[in-house]
Each structure stands twice: as structure tokens, then as C-alpha cells.
Image (cartoon, grey):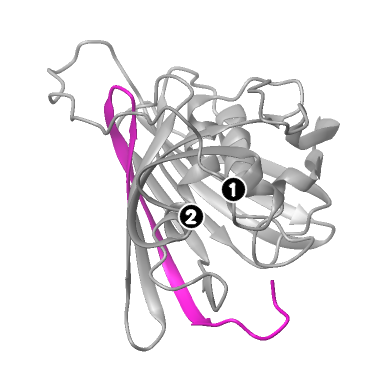
């Protein structure tokens, strides 16, 4: 994948071993690193890797993953990881898949994904919603971390250094797993965890915004390489917040994402 960005044409993860009884092993690259600390991943790439595992565990290729809830159980290192997924509730119309991401002996993230059977032309769909135009040029990356540089950001409203609600188009500059094309679900999960950062109400330089979870609900899979987020964040005086994102592609709405937040002053020397 080459968008003329100067970012190395590799991936967020490199597969180290095929799937066995314990799962699949991967090495996270520098492109997964987030803005909160050196050697720690942004939540987007692990969420997408868990989504990939959930898709692979399903025996129903044509079904849609209608909800994914990803719990971040602790800091996720930029290093070797093992991911495993299993169908825990099979069914003829819906199925529930559970996936886990481990760093050594420690579980660092887990996901539960509901998949729903699809059939063509069952009902008349709702009318497509209007979406903001795609800006002609990418925004200058000003946040730290390899993840931010590995995504192309085009803000229709707001910007990296602009506080408040934002609307941004996103496109990955590298693959999720080296040598693989990204699925529509993986594209969504890769950026759904960015609604908080895109719509920060307080400066990143002075405050931490930690989300222990991200939930994504989808009524259809995106079409094409661009995923848009219309994001806003609300923060209470006691340091708890909620970031919400309307998710869309160039054809209209696809779903919503939400992130509960722990908000607090950044300690000196952190990040």
C-alpha cells in the first residue's frame, strides 16, 4: 500500500505463526504506538486485530458484525502478541464470538462480537444520509506516536490542535497485517477508538484521556477505503467522560462508536 506519504509500506502487525490451539502470534510494529507512552499501543490496531480474529472464527462469511465491544485490560506493549477467538454462542440467525489478546501470560484486551445473518432485499433500507465532502489534502500530523502518522487524516471540521467536536475522514497508510488486505470491519475498528482524540475538550499536552473500552455498533459494512468520524466528547467535573462518534463512509452512515473516559491531569514526564 503506497499513498506517497513517506510511511514505510509495511503494516501494523507482522504474523509470526499460523493459528494453532493457543491462537495466532503477531509482532506489533512501530505503527501501533499511541500518544500516551513510548512502547505502548494505541487502542485502534489491537481492536482491529481482535475483529480480524472474530471474523476468522465465524463460519458465516456473509453475516455482518453488528456490534463489537473491546475491553482494554491493561497497557498493550509494542511487541509480540497472541490472539485467539471462539464462537461462544452459535446460532442460525445470530452468533456471539469472544476474542482475547495476550502479551506473554497477560491478557491485555478482549472483545465480544455479535454477528447477524444477512439476506438480500429483505426490507427497504433507510434513505442514505448526507456526509461531509472529503477535503482535498491531508492534515499535518502533530500528535506523537506511530499510529497517528500511519493514518491519513482529513478534517472537515476541527483539527489536531483544535479543541471540541470534530469531523474527520480517515484512511490507513499501511495494512493491518503484512501481506493481507484489510476487511471493512477491520478498517472501522482501526479508527473507531480515535473519536476521543479527534474531539478532545482539553489539551493533549496537559491531560490524559484513557478509555478502558470502545463499543462499535454497525448496521452495514463500509464501502471503500475512507472511514469518517463525526465525534464529540462530554466531560464531567469528576473526571469521567464519554466520547461518541457517528461513523460513515462516502455513501452515508454505517453506525456509531462510544468510549467511556478517565480524564485527569497529565503527570510531568508522561507521554
Dividing the picture into quadrants, the one containing residue 85 is: top right
> Residue 188 in the image: x percent, y percent?
47, 37
The quarter of the rendered structure image containing the N terminus is: top right
In the picture of the structure, the residue carrying the numbered disc 2 is 160
Q: Main secondary structure of the magenta part?
A: strand
Which residue is rendered at x = 41% and y = 67% of the image? 260
Residue situated in front as seen by the camera: 11 or 259: 11
Q: Residues within 10 Å of mark 1 (few under 14, many from 20)?
A: some
Query: Residues in magenta?
Result: 245-271
Q: Which mark is residue 141?
A: 1
Q: Please give the name of the residue rendered at 69% of the width and 71% of the height, measured from the top-left corner.
A: 271
> Residue at (34%, 52%) from the top-left corner?
166
Q: Is residue 190 above or below residue 209?
A: above
User: Residue 79 vs residue 68: left or right?
Assistant: right
Q: Nearer the viewer, residue 116 or 158?
A: 158
Secondary structure of the residue carrying numbered label 2: loop
Residue 198, visible in the rendered structure? yes
Amino acid at each position: 500500500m503506497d499513498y506517497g506519504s513517506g510511511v514505510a509500506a509495511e503494516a501494523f502487525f507482522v504474523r509470526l505463526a499460523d493459528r494453532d490451539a493457543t491462537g495466532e502470534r503477531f509482532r506489533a510494529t512501530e505503527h501501533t504506538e499511541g500518544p500516551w507512552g513510548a512502547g505502548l499501543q494505541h487502542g485502534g490496531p489491537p481492536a482491529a486485530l481482535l475483529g480480524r480474529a472474530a471474523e476468522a472464527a465465524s463460519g458465516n462469511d456473509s453475516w455482518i458484525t453488528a456490534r463489537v465491544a473491546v475491553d482494554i485490560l491493561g497497557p498493550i506493549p509494542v511487541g509480540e502478541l497472541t490472539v485467539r477467538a471462539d464462537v461462544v454462542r452459535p446460532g442460525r440467525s445470530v452468533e456471539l464470538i469472544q476474542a482475547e489478546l495476550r502479551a506473554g501470560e497477560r491478557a491485555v484486551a478482549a472483545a465480544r462480537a455479535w454477528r447477524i445473518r444477512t439476506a438480500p432485499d429483505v426490507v427497504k433500507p433507510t434513505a442514505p444520509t448526507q456526509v461531509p465532502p472529503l477535503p482535498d489534502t491531508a492534515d499535518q500530523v502533530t500528535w506523537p506516536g506511530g499510529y497517528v502518522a500511519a493514518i491519513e487524516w482529513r478534517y472537515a471540521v476541527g483539527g489536531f490542535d483544535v479543541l471540541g467536536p470534530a469531523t474527520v475522514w480517515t484512511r490507513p497508510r499501511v495494512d493491518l497485517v503484512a501481506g493481507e488486505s484489510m476487511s471493512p470491519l477491520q478498517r472501522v475498528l482501526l479508527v473507531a477508538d480515535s473519536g476521543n482524540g479527534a474531539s478532545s475538550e482539553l489539551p493533549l499536552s496537559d491531560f490524559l484521556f484513557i478509555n478502558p473500552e470502545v463499543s462499535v455498533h454497525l448496521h452495514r459494512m463500509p464501502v471503500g477505503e475512507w472511514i469518517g468520524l463525526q465525534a464529540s466528547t462530554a466531560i464531567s467535573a469528576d473526571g469521567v467522560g464519554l466520547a461518541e462518534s457517528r461513523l460513515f463512509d462516502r455513501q452515508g452512515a454505517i453506525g456509531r462508536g462510544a468510549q467511556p473516559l478517565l480524564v485527569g491531569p497529565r503527570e510531568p514526564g508522561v507521554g
